[in-house]
Image (tube, rainbow, N blue to C red):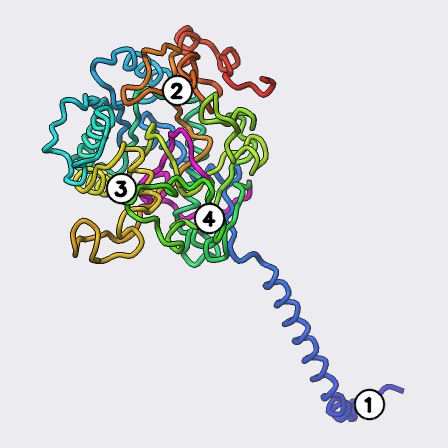
Amino acid sequence: MAPSPANQPGLLWRQLPKLLRARRLVLLAFAVFAYLVLSQRPRAQWRPPSSGAAATRSGDLAAVANDTLGFDKVFAINRPSRSDRRDSLSLAAALTGVRLSYSDGIDGSEVEERVLPADSEGKRIRKGNVGSWRAHMNVLRTIVEEGLETALILEDDIDWDVRLKSQLQTFSLASQAFLQPLDGHSHGRSLSALLRDEGDATTTLPRIPQLPHQPQGSPYGTGWDVLWLGHCGTELPIHEGEEDAKNPHRDADADAPPPPPPAQKKPLGGVVVTIRDDETVPAPRHLRPHPFADRPDRLATAHPPRTRAVHASRATTCSLGYAVSRAGARRLLWRLGVDTLTAGFDLMLRDLCDGRYHGDGEGGVEGGGREAGQWRGRGRPVCVTVQPPLFSHFSSGRGDAGSDIQGVGGGYMQRSGSQYIRLSVKQNLGRLVEGASVEELVDQWPDDRL
């Protein structure tokens, strides 16, 4: 028998405790569910754009594809006597849509000793190295004088893939991830800062739409000093406490600056951003800095085939191609031009990026060094590199037409070509001039090559 309307208030009053208990149970269940969901969310994840999301950054990608590759200028260092190199470099640039600003190379025998930094006295530095150093300093000085925001500096004996611009577009997304504050739940921090806080990590450039904040200025991101894009070898970052068996500074002379303290080894952390399924990357067995190398690069075994890796520069050698920001140009001109000259330019750049110079860990004025109380700087520069490199040394195959700095042994100069570069612009100059399509170009390192 249903309760009468007169008895309903009393019935509700008697059932109220049960209703309240049920409500509390519902709220408790919701709280537990929310906790479980939120606790499973990744704490630090950067997701680069898919093809659709990339369209929102079309301005950035278009800038990278312009005739200065997204930089204010592209400089090429060329000794006037090497007309052979200038001819081929100018052709290569014209055929791939790159505009070069030439800067004269320097004969080291013409550089007076009195203009060298004081610490060069007593050092046995080859005249070829002195000339190369001065040529790079002249370009850096021009960048400083003209107030350029960014510039790319190339040596004249380099080679690149005919697909360079698309390679740089992908690299720009990875470099932005390293340095730009990320959207989402990053609290304004970059990928390298987020993953550094969580320990060393490798992350792939996935195809999921989540972008860093829009870069201001350079399409390669902000906050970098050097983008080391062309080299003849670099090392992947090491993990905390890992034995660095290949440390190039292990046997440094007693007069050299000490190695950086462990806490300062990785200003960008041990983070590696990998670009998978890159058809411009040679097969792992071909990833060697020179044909007579006894084993492939570590990249060949550390990652799947056709992987390109972007990470903090470590033990990088050969200054074949590198970009500098305004701050980076000023820093290099001061440290490697005015302040010190103890070795070849590329070795000093390596040491600077690796944090070997006094004060590149802690800022302020310290005692010791050449002069007590000398200003040591605010911290090591931010140097980002890529491997395999996007620019590589090109050999014409003539032993007498090689490096103006020093010879390269092992028969390297006996064959024409370049390491790491598949559709070489230099190897295909004749075909490109005659209008050959990409399918008709010679692949230096085809997948089926033994």
Between 43 and 368, the residue placed more toward the observer is 368
**Where are the magenta residues, as a range?**
207-235
391 is within the stretch colored magenta: no
Task: Give the mark nearer the N terminus: 4 vs 3.
Answer: 4
Q: Secondary structure at mark 2?
A: loop
Q: How far apart in space, not on screen, are marks 4 and 3 (Cα)?
A: 22 Å
Kindly identify the amino acid type of the residue bearing the numbered disc 2.
Gly
Kindly identify the amino acid type of the residue bearing the numbered disc 3.
Gly
Q: Which residue is mark 4?
A: 270
Q: Secondary structure at mark 3?
A: helix
* Rendered residue at 19%/21% (across/down): 107
Q: Which residue is mark 1?
A: 4
User: Quick one: label 2, few (<14), some, or many (20+) residues within 10 Å?
Assistant: few
Cβ atoms under marks 4 and 3 closer than 8 Å: no
Q: Which mark is residue 68?
A: none
Q: How far apart in space, not on screen, are marks 1 and 3 (Cα)?
A: 87 Å
Q: Which residue is mark 3?
A: 328
Q: Which one is closest to the eye, mark 4 or mark 1? A: 4
Q: Which residue is mark 2?
A: 409
Kindly identify the amino acid type of the residue bearing the numbered disc 1.
Ser
Residue 291 location in percent, x, y?
48, 21
* Rendered residue at 29%/11% (across/down): 84
